[in-house]
Amino acid sequence: MPGWSSLSCRTWRRLVCATLGWLCASLAQAEGDTLVLHRVGAPENAVAALRGPALYLKGDGPPDSASFAAFLQQVSGDRLDVVVLGASYPDWEGECRTITGLDQVNSCTTIVIRQPQDASDPAVLDAIRRAEVVYFRGGDQCNFMRWRDSPLPAAVRQVVQRGGGTGGGSAGLAIQGSLAVYDGCQGSVSSTSALAEPYHDSVSFSEHLFDWSALRNTLTDSHFVKRDRMGRLMAFLCRQLATGHTAQAWGLGINEGTAVVIDRHGLGTVYGDTAYMVLADRPADSCRREADPVSYAGYKVWRLDAGQQFDFARRPQTGYYRVDVDQGALSANPYEPPAPAHTLALRERDRLDGL
């Protein structure tokens, strides 16, 4: 047929993808394609009245049904089209398998981008702009940060600006904060190492990819209790204060099996297990020279259990407990608030009163 011979190999593959998605995914993985687009669900996009924006923040990879369903309700009461963005794995399964099981989901499209230039691909940008929800999945956040100068972040922002939703899990959570992004481009770092050497090469940051109002001055971290990341988050905040990026450095750490859903008013609700908000709001005693371990008196910590809420728009001034760090050592278990104190005087008076 005239003109068909000029179609590129990639264009041919997309034509196949439109009708045989499973074959497209198999071909892409077998040939090592740098770009995978795979849609499941309805072939035509839904028309939805949006009432967001909303954020979905997950402590580990794929979303879970209950919390994601609650998130979708914050976005709209209508059926929705979801895009899942990945940068580390070639497969299309996982997230969309869970998401398409929800009654409110019209379609779910997985886009895997393994070369930064493909973040500018017109098919990618069109799929994002036509969606109502964009979810960044787990993997390596350094790969996501390579999209920073592409049109892709702006396309996601457009979805949110018209009342849609976004967020991510694990690496997809790490890129959501507006204070800075711990990019992991020099390898991961443990709490012990970060507190001892907050300027080590592995404590590397990139300028934020997004600037969501609910996450102002906030740095995000995942797998929080499971991988003992409170200490490193405290080191990250100390660094941000010492380098003058902010006078109030907030950190949001979300444990595995936990999601935080933030509505259009900035009110966040915890689903699953636990999340933590940490505040450093006074000059740091250390973190000013590369040889300094972290010393900081008075990190403020809010522990948020399942069902609890936190106002990200009007940050609370009460309800926290304090944790100190001295020469890289924590003063107490940072994941548990201290037990209420009872004085001997109070106990003596109780006895005298016959109680």
Image (cartoon, rainbow, N blue to C red):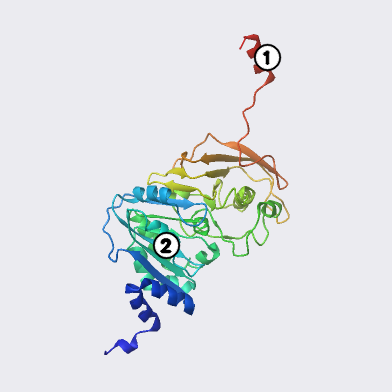
On the picture, is 328 further left or further right than 321?
A: right
Viewport quadrant of the N terminus = bottom left
* Classed neighbour count for the residue bearing mark 2: other residues with Cα under 10 Å, few (<14), some (14–19), many (≥20): many
Mark 1: secondary structure: helix
Q: Closer to the camera, 204 or 169?
A: 169
Q: Residue 186 in the image: x percent, y percent?
A: 63, 64
Q: Where on the picture, by quarter, is residue 269?
A: top left
Mark 2: secondary structure: strand
How many numbered badges does the structure rendering display? Answer: 2
Q: Which residue is mark 2?
A: 84
* Classed neighbour count for the residue bearing mark 1: other residues with Cα under 10 Å, few (<14), some (14–19), many (≥20): few
Q: Which mark is residue 348?
A: 1
On the picture, is 52 further left or further right than 222?
A: left
Q: Residue 130 in the image: x percent, y percent?
A: 32, 63
Q: Residue 260 in the image: x percent, y percent?
A: 46, 47
93 to 329, vertically: above or below:
below
Q: Is residue 165 visible?
A: yes
Residue at figure coordinates x 36%, y 67% from the top left: 39
Viewport quadrant of the C terminus = top right
On the picture, is 79 further left or further right than 60?
A: left
Q: Residue 310 in the image: x percent, y percent?
A: 47, 40
Residue at figure coordinates x 40%, y 70% from the top left: 37
Q: Earlier in the sequence, mark 1 or mark 2?
A: 2
Cα–Cα gap, marks 1 and 2: 62 Å
Label 2 amino acid? Val
Residue at figure coordinates x 66%, y 55% from the top left: 190
Q: Is residue 312 visible?
A: no
Q: Closer to the camera, 245 or 294?
A: 294
Q: Which mark is residue 94?
A: none
Q: Where on the picture, by quarter, is residue 81?
A: bottom left
Label 1 amino acid? Glu
